[in-house]
Image: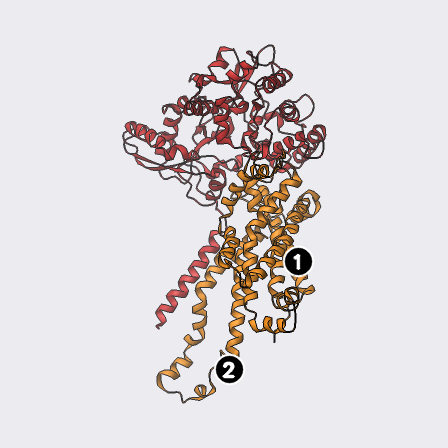
Chain colours: A red, B orange
Amino acid sequence: MGHKKTTALSGAVLAAAMLALSACSGGGSGVTGEAATAPSDAKEVSGKIEVLTQRTDLVKNGTLKKYAAEFNKIYPKVKVSFDGITDYEGEVRIRMNGKVYGDVLFIPGAVAKNDYPKFFAPLGTTQEMSKYRFSDKTEVDGKVYGVAQFGTANGFVYNKALWKKAGITTWPKSPQEFLAGLKAIKDKTGATPYYTNFKDGWPLTQWTSNLGGVGCDAQASNALAGPVSPWKAGSEMNTIDTLLHDIVKQGLSEKDPTTTNWESSKALLAEGKIGTMMLGSWAITQMQQAAKEGGTDPADIGFMPFPVQNDGKFCGALVSDYQQAVSIYSENKPAARAWVDWFTEKSGFAEKEGVVSALKSAPMPATLKEFVDNDVTFFDRSEAKTAAVNDIDEAAEIGLNKQDYRQKLVDTARGVEKGDIEDFFAGLNKRWDEAAKTVGD
Amino acid sequence: MTEKTDTARESAVMTGRSVTDKTDTGSHGRPGRRPAGRRRAPSAGRSRSWRDSPLRKITPWLFLAAPLALLITFTYVPVASMISYSFTDWDGVSPDRENVGFDNYVQIFTRPELFRVFFVSGYYLAASVVQIAVALYFAVVLSFNLKFRNLFKGILFFPYLINGVAIGFVFLYFFQDGGTLDSVLSWFGVTTDHPWLGDPTSANISLAGVSVWRFTGLNFVLFLGAIQSIPGELYEAAELDGAGKWKQFRHIIAPSIKPVISLSVILAISGSLSVFEIPYIMTGGATGTQTFVIQTIKLAFQFNKTGLASAAAVVLLLIILLITWIQRRLVPDDKVDLV
């Protein structure tokens, strides 16, 4: 055994230890400044870009590859690859501690708004980006860091044939009418009037997206930034959560919520075994797909707004989906930016998925035809104060966009959790207000 | 009762090793010491330079280098950084973090709701009593000659080999409305309308039941191994003296496997406090099935309170160390002397 080998070996061990130590010392400050501006000449821009996405289904079935091929017709020198991530939030936030997190990615919810400039390249000024919906959501100091992938309206996906069978042909105009409608479905058809998707949980978070639509208020989300007791009587959150509570309390939801299954619920709704589910308008095409696969009529899938009227009209708040951003560490920022622009404006993705395009000038999708025909008032819900609202939400450990507190609400309504809805709301208000004071915005 | 795989395996190996050590000591004298003659042998040329070479002192460290590097990289460095996070207000993503001193720990001990989840561990603790009893019973029965003995051993150990995530999914179907459990019960004329995971009590009992199903095999194998190291003559002698099976168990088997039983109890308690997999997959902590670890994960990844969650993890670690220490005090690990 020679000495050389020894030193080499111990050197390697030392290096490994150093690496381990340095790896945990945090992300560093990152490079700042360089904007991701759109390339001026489509033929010249080149490079490889990686796009992170949570739509693993579209990666697997090759749909995204087809989009990339379309993209290459305009930008022939850019090579696009996709990384489908099942646990998007969980994985990407950890990858963001390093420098390799794709060139184009969706901004994870965990990233604080004020940190955007440390992770993403600015895309343009507020003025330049004003052609997109929801650009205020990612605006920091006059620069915009993300473009919404698309927007969605919120409401109840329902089985028209089933509702008709129960004798209801017009949209309920109040929570009471809605509950009566569900009751009629239960009594006359024997189907499950409403399905909570309690086990999968995330569909419960959809209820929060009604914020704004209930009171016809584009500032509804921003109004939560402060000790405002969001669940006080008469507030939007109170109306939203009371309706869910009443549905469950009156036995109008599925019998055993703890073992629900999202994938099979789509087919059940298409078949008419489930009457209604609270979801975003993105779900309509998936339900129609399920109807096609199950051999029922896709035209039976309907979409109705939250049962509240303001001045005799329904309101549809449009809410932003994930925002696409360009990594600050991307070496091909123009190419990445070209992808974001192309995907948002020219890919036809929003149209195909039946969701609202982020481009303000684009027409409403076919899935929302009912809304348009019935003269539902559309508006973009402002997200300017999302950062402050999220800070309070996290400090209070409530989770407006997490399933836990609503699962507790459903359990309270079912009577397996102690207390009643008044205590429940009072507790939420107290936590919210206390957190708002400590966060101090 | 969960999460005990590694420690359990290690200790199984350790028990095995101590048995071989014992036999070594009997037959070959003291292992590890070189015969004295060699030491005094005249040193010349190569052998002298080898003995004086600094390499000789390094050699054991060279052998240790790889495992030590792995141990440090994957155990001590992460634990150290977790402890350092616990003194910050880090959100898990931001490059900036601020030192907040003991603030996180103060929060943990001043917010009773964070500790309330430990009540859920009670269900698992109770279940682990059942688990150890069942495992012990089968280990004793199957250590005697029995038809299809190996088949039964296989059946009992099999659940432990299945991936925890798969078990979660399987039992989700098992417990669902009109699922396996309901249909099996209906064969016996028991029709129940009860949603098994529907209220906190039955949900926790169901989940603890799954946990028993999964981990009994591990306890069983540990016990079986220990029982089989008891020399057969002891039973013969006992039988000649007129001792029945219960007396044999009481006076021969139980005392000789005492260390393994006490190990199992320690693992059961620490496992019960840190239950995670099964409830996380099956209910996600809904309907009163949230455990301390699930709560910690939610603090870290839902509410972005990595600092607070790290502090909670450190507290859990300390609690488990404390309980183990107390138990070691109460039940000292005395030597088992059979003969």
Picture layout, residue B54 above or below residue B109: below
Q: Is residue A325 left or right of residue A236?
A: left
User: Percent position (x, y) of residue A359?
Assistant: 43, 21
Label 2: which residue?
B29
Q: Which of pointers 2 and 1 indicates the residue nearer the eye?
A: 2
Label 1: which residue?
B323
User: Percent position (x, y) of residue A119?
Assistant: 46, 39
User: Percent position (x, y) of residue B256?
Assistant: 61, 68
Inspect the image, locate mark 2, and give the three-letter code of the amino acid beneath it.
Gly
Picture layout, residue B82 above or below residue B201: below
Secondary structure beneath label 1:
helix
**Residue B308 makes an appearance in the image:** no
Sequence-wise first label, 2 or 1: 2
Give the camera-side residue of A411 and A37.
A411
**Which quadrant of the rendered structure holds the N terminus of chain A?**
bottom left
Picture layout, residue B65 above or below residue B94: below
Secondary structure beneath label 2:
loop
Inspect the image, locate mark 1, and give the three-letter code of the amino acid beneath it.
Ile
**Residue for point 47% across, 22% down:** A284
Give the camera-side residue of A229 and B128.
B128
